[in-house]
Image (cartoon, grey):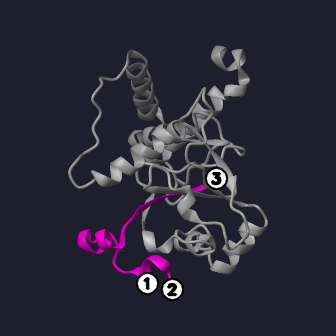
Amino acid sequence: MTDQNRDPSKRIAQHILAQEIVELAHGAAEAKKVAMAHKDAFGQGTNTFSLLSLRKAISHVKGADTTTETRTEPPSEAEKNLLAYKKAFAASATTQPVQGTTTATTAADEPPQPDTNKNVITLPLSMLHAGSFPHILHAVGLASSKSEASRLIASKGAYVLVPNSGPPENPTALRWETIKPNKDCDPNHYLVDFVALVLRAGKSKIQICRVVRDEADEAKGLLQSKVEVHRQ
C-alpha cells in the first residue's frame, strides 16, 4: 500500500488483486502467465503495443514444436513468503468454492488482456490485399461477419498496429491506427517484421496474425484449408 499511495496511477494494488483472483480461480501458473502477457504487451501504455512482446509471440509459435517453456530463475524471497502465506490460508479455509463459479474477473476498468504467447493465428499471404480488412477481421474472429467488420471499421472501432511507429525515445512501443474505411487500405502495408499483422477491435480484443506464404502453409500443414481460415 505504500507503493500504491506513492503513485496511484500505476494501479499497483489493483493489478495485484486481479492476479490474486485469477490465481484463486485458475492456479498460480495461469495467473503468472496472464500477468506477464499483460506486462509484455501493455507495459509501455495502453495506446501502444510492445514490439518485443510481438516478436516473442511469433518466436514462440515458430518454436512451439521443439521448445518447452520453463522457469530458469529460482523464486525470490518475497515469492516464497507469499506462497507460504497462501498455503496457510488455503489450509485454514473452511468454505469450498461452488462448482461452476470460478470465472475470474479483473477491476471493472481493466479489461482482460490476451496471452500473447499463444493467441496467434496463421494467415495466408494471399488473403492480404487492398480492401481485405473486413474479410480478415471476420476470419480471425474479431467480427462475426464481414458486414459487422465493415461497420466496426466505419465506426472507427477497428485498429491495426503500425510498423516502425515507435518514437525515437521508445522505438519498441508501436502505436495503433484506426483502419480506414476505403478499398485502398492495404494490410500488406502494416506487416511488422514482414511476418506479423496485429489487429484490435474496441479496447481489449487483440489478435496477432502470423502471415506466411501459401506454399509454406501447404508444406507445413499450418492451415487445414483456405475455406476454414476464411470461415466461408
Mark 2 falls on what kind of element? loop
Q: Is residue 217 magenta?
A: yes
- Magenta highlight range: 205-232
Q: Is residue 224 left or right of residue 191?
A: left
Question: Would you say residue 71 sits in the magenta stretch?
Answer: no
Evaluate whether residue 199 shows in this view: yes
Image height of 195 relative to 130, above or below = above
Q: Nearer the viewer, residue 65 or 221?
A: 221
- The disc label shown at residue 227, or none: 1
Q: According to the image, label 3 marks what residue?
A: 204
In this view, the residue farthest toward the right is 155
In the foreground, 113 or 134: 134
At label 2, counting other C-alpha atoms closer than 10 Å, the crowd grade (few under 14, some 14-19, many 20 or more) is few
Amino acid, disc 3: Ser
Q: Residue at x 62, y 76 (%)?
A: 144
Pointer 1 local density, CA inside 10 Å: few below 14, some 14–19, many at least 20: few
- Image coordinates for residue 19, horizontal then vertical, percent: 53, 37
Q: Is residue 86 left or right of residue 134?
A: left
Residue 94 seen in this snapshot = no
Instruction: Name the residue carrying label 2.
Output: 232
Relative image position of residue 182 (x, y in whole percent): 72, 71
* Sequence-first tag of 2 and 3: 3
Ranked by sequence position, the earlier of labels 3 and 1 is: 3
Question: Which amino acid, by three-letter code, is at mark 2?
Answer: Gln
Report the residue at 60% width, 37% height from top.
Answer: 166
Q: Which x, y percent locates residue 209?
A: 47, 60
Residue 201 drawn at (x, y percent): 65, 60
Task: Determine which of the numbered discs, if any, sits on residue 156 in the image.
Answer: none
* Residue type indicated by callout 1: Val
Pointers 2 and 1 in contact (C-beta within 8 Å): yes
Q: What's the CA distance linking mark 3 and mark 1?
A: 27 Å
